[in-house]
Image (cartoon, rainbow, N blue to C red):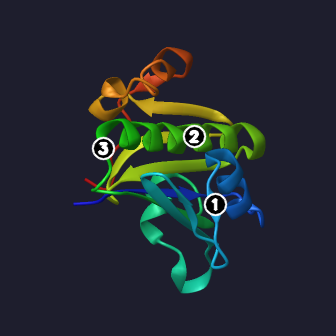
Amino acid sequence: MAIEYTWYGDTDTASLREFIATATAGEQHADGTVFLDGMYISARQVSGDEVNPAVALFGFDHRFTATFRLSAHSDEPTTSHAEALMVHTLIAFAARFGGHGVLLFNGETAVLQYTDGTVTLDAEWADWTENPEVAPLLTQFPSQMLPQPLL
């Protein structure tokens, strides 16, 4: 089964896909999808009926969505690296653009959240502590139990 993380944010940026491609060193295809070893990412601005009202539970307006789909066929080191690239992408985005955002595992569990450039990692998410590339970030960024309004 493929693993999926969904990133919701409130920043208006026309260069979201390009930013993701650069941050992950992925290859952006004509439809905007970014591909790299073990993962592909689709991202888009949203408006009108595309807005997910549940995002307001995190305290911000939903303006974009990016979905990170990790391949079920990748080995553990490739998956761990893809997850680390995903986390680093959100950290870099928060530092550059600010705003508010949340990263959800399988659409409901908040595992990373940022507000005005401050990134907080969920302290109870085992994938962070077990990932050799992400675990060091737990000492560099705030780590706490994140609110889980969708559970």
Three-letter code, disc 1: Glu
Q: Residue at x 60, y 84 (%)?
A: 48
Q: In the picture shown, does residue 126 fall above or below 82?
A: above
The residue at which mark 2 appears reads as 114
Q: In the picture shown, does residue 91 fall above or below 63?
A: above
- The spot of residue 122 in percent (x, y) is 39, 32
Looking at the rendered structure, the secondary structure element under dot 2 is strand
Which of labels 1 and 2 is toward the front?
A: 1
Circles 3 and 2, Cβ within 8 Å, touching? The answer is no
Give the crowd class for mark 2: few <14, some 14-19, many >=20 residues within 10 Å.
many
The residue at which mark 1 appears reads as 27
Three-letter code, disc 2: Tyr
Q: In the picture, residue 117 is in which quadrant?
A: top right
The residue at which mark 3 appears reads as 75
Instruction: Tell me which label, 3 or 1, sits earlier in the chain.
Output: 1
Name the one closer to the observer, 92 or 39.
39
Q: In the picture, residue 128 is in which quadrant?
A: top left
Looking at the rendered structure, the secondary structure element under dot 1 is strand
Q: CA distance from mark 3 to mark 2?
A: 29 Å
- The spot of residue 149 in percent (x, y) is 34, 51
Q: Residue at x 33, y 24 (%)?
A: 129
Instruction: Tell me which label, 1 or 2, sits earlier in the chain.
Output: 1
Q: In the picture, residue 96 is in which quadrant?
A: top right
Furthest residue to the bottom? 49
Three-letter code, disc 3: Asp
Looking at the rendered structure, the secondary structure element under dot 3 is loop
